[in-house]
Image (cartoon, rainbow, N blue to C red):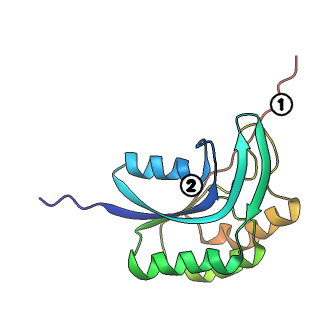
Amino acid sequence: MVNSIIPIMTISGSDSINGAGIQADIRTISAMGGVAHTVITTVTAQNSHGIADVFDLPSEIVIGQVRAVLSDMHPKAIKIGMIHQEDAMKTLRSELSSCPNIVCAPGILTSRGERLMSDGLVQEYIRTIFPIVKVLVIKFLQQMTS
């Protein structure tokens, strides 16, 4: 029996301390026996205390990465994380709509509760990306009161 590796594309931001984003997706996909094909949307400068800076790659670069992976690797599933570019979201919807296995974890909040997306960006995400996903993962942080 031939052991085939399942190609999975992940579209998300880069987390310089390896706690989330593309780096965490690569670990998860690899641990489950897949091979990760990555599309980076955003680069962060961060440490365990928080995010110091965020740089969003131009939408043309994000979409170019998606098209390159789709044309060659034919992923069986796609995981979508943080996307800050509204125009990229709209184009992604049409590029990815034929994939039946899309998982979305939009990265609205950091693990420390910091907002990564404005309300307007969240609304655009809901309008454009949510309708094409099969599984949606949302992080809620509960405020602890003493």
List the residue tagged with mark 2: 22
The answer to whether one can see residue 96 in this image is: no
Residue 54: give its label.
none
Seen as rendered, the residue at the extreme top is 146
Q: Residue at x 81, y 57 (%)?
A: 117
Seen as rendered, the residue at the extreme left is 1
Q: Position of residue 89 (x, y in %)?
A: 70, 74
Depicted 64 relative to depicted 139: above or below: below
Q: Position of residue 63 (x, y in %)?
A: 61, 78
CA separation in Å, label 1 and label 2: 27 Å
Q: Position of residue 5 (x, y in %)?
A: 29, 60
Depicted 100 relative to depicted 145: above or below: below
Marks 1 and 2: CB-CB under 8 Å? no
Task: Work out whether mark 1 precedes mark 2 in sequence or the reverse, and give the earlier one.
Answer: 2
Residue 143: give its label.
1
Foreground of the two, 100 or 9: 9
- Residue 31 occupies quadrant: top left
Q: Residue at x 87, y 60 (%)?
A: 119
Q: Which amino acid type is marked by label 2? A: Ile
Q: Position of residue 120 (x, y in %)?
A: 87, 65
